[in-house]
Amino acid sequence: MRIAELLAHGERNVEVTAKGWVRTKRGNKNVAFIALNDGSTIHNIQVVAETAAFDETLLKNITTGACLKVTGLLVDSPASGQPVEIQARTIEIYGLADPESYPLQKKGHTLEFLREIAHLRPRTNTFGAVFRIRHAMAYAIHKYFNDRGFYYWNSPLITASDAEGAGAMFRVTTLAPGETDFNEDFFGRPTNLTVSGQLEGELAAMALGQIYTFGPTFRAENSNTPRHLAEFWMVEPEMAFYEIEDNMNLAEDFIKYLVNYALEHCADDLAFLEKMYDAELTERLRFVTANDFVRLTYTEGVKILEEARDTKGVKFEFPVFWGADLAAEHERYLVEQHFRRPVIMTDYPKEIKAFYMKQNEDGRTVRGMDVLFPKIGEIIGGSEREADYDKLVARMDEMGVPTETMQWYLDTRRFGSAPHSGFGLGFERLVLFVTGMTNIRDVIPFPRTPKNAEF
Ligand code: ATP
Ligand code: MN
C-alpha cells in the first residue's frame, strides 16, 4: 500500500509494508524514529524501530535519502499530527544515500539551489507538492474538456510555418554546420519547433466542432523573466460557432473549474505551500472562483492607466498610449490595484495582434482577448478568428504573412467557413498561480531557459 492510503485508512494492528525514501531519522539509544515518504502524499509515515531489535550497521545506514522497505504493525500513533505509525519488524535497505554526498539534507534549501539539482528536487516536500498539483491540473484539463464533448487533438511539434509570429522559433535541421541547402535537409525545407498549435487546431474545430490541444510549445525568445520558458506547455481549445462572448465565458468557466479542482483535490499540498511560501494562497484561489472577472476593452483599459498616471501620480516604466502593447506592469496595475480582480481585456488595436483575429467594424481593433491574473499577468491569450476569406487574406498581405504557403490554413475559410474562436492557456502560468510559486522554473520538472538545458 502506498503511504497516502496507510495514513488515510490503514487498518490498525495489521502487519503492513511501506516502501519509500527517508526524510529524517531521529531518536535515542533505545529507539529510532524514521520519517518515510513515497511521493503519494506530502505527509510522511513514522516508522518506529527499537534499536535492540535491529543490526547496528543497518540502523546507521538509514540516513536521509536512503530507500527502505519496512514491514511491521500499523498502530495508532501516540504522537500528535499523525494518525498512525509503523512498529518496524523488518527493515530492508534498497539503496543507501551517503550523507557526505547526498545534497538534500534535513535543513531547508533555497529554491535557487534546488534548481541546480533539478534531478533530485522532486524528493523535497515543496516539489512533491508542486508536481502533484501539476499532475492534478493536467488531469482536470482533460476531464473538463472530455465532460463537455471536446476532443483532444494533437497539432504537430515540427512545422514549416511561422504563421503566428508568436515568438522566435527554434530551427529543426539535420544539416551539418555550414550546410545551407535546405533541399538537402531532412524535410527538404526549413522547419521549426512550433510556437502554438492553434492554426492546426482551427482545422480540427472546423470538422470536429470543439477540440483542444495540450502539448509542448517552444519559443526562442531571449526573455529571462520569472514567467517565460523556452519550452512550455499550452492548452488550446478551439470551438466552431463560438463568438468572442462565448470564448470569454468558456475561458472564465475553465479557469474557475481548474482552481476549484485544486482546492478540492490538492488540499494537503496547498496547505503545505501556504504555510511555507504564501500565506494568502488559498484565499486568493477562493477569491478567483467566487468572483466574476472584469471585462473591459483595451480602449477603456488604456484610459484607466492614463488617468492613474496623470491624476494619481502612478509611475510606469513603459509608456501608456492608445496603440501601445501593454506591459506586465500595466496589466498588473489594472488587476492588482485598480480592479483587484481578474480581468478579461478585449478589442485590441489590430497592429499589436496576430493576423488571424476577427476585425471589428471600426477598422482599428480586433476581437482578441487576454485574461489577466493577479501575480501572473497574462494567463490566457485568445480571440474570435477572422472567418471571412477576403478579409483574412487582405490582413495577411498587410502584415507580410505569406499566403502561398498557408493555403492549407486558408482552406478552412474557402470551404464551409464559420465563426469560430479559441484561446491558449499557458499551463505553467496556471500552475504558478495555483501553487503560489513565483518563478516559472519551479513549476516544470526541467526548465529550459536561455543558457540552460541541464538534465
Ligand atoms: P507574453 O506577453 O506573456 O509573453 P504572449 O502574448 O507572447 O505572452 P501568447 O502567444 O498569447 O503569449 O500565448 C498564450 C499563452 O501562453 C499566454 O497567455 C501565456 O499564458 C503562455 N505563454 C506565452 N509565452 C510563454 C512562455 N515563454 N513561457 C510560458 N508561458 C508562455
Ligand atoms: Mn498573448
Image: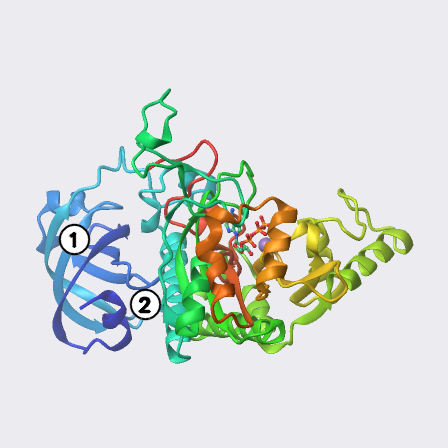
The way the protein has been coloured in the rendering is rainbow
Between 83 and 20, the residue placed more toward the observer is: 20
Looking at the image, residue 73 sits to the left or right of residue 452; the answer is left
Q: Are marks 1 and 2 in contact (CB under 8 Å)?
A: no
Q: Nearer the viewer, mark 1 or mark 2?
A: 1
Q: Earlier in the sequence, mark 1 or mark 2?
A: 1
Element on which disc 1 rests: strand
Q: In which quarter of the image is residue 136?
A: bottom left
Up-down relation of residue 86 to residue 396 (above or below): below
Q: Residue at x 58, y 57 (%)?
A: 356
Quadrant field for ligand 2: bottom right
Residue at left 83%, top 51%? 314
Q: Disc 1 marks which amino acid?
A: Leu
Residue 201: which quarter of the image? bottom left
Q: How many marks?
A: 2
Residue corresponding to mark 2: 79
- 95 or 33, nearer to the observer: 95
Residue 440 lies, in percent from the top left, at: 49, 49
User: Label 1: which residue?
Assistant: 68
Q: Can residue 102 be seen in this view?
A: yes
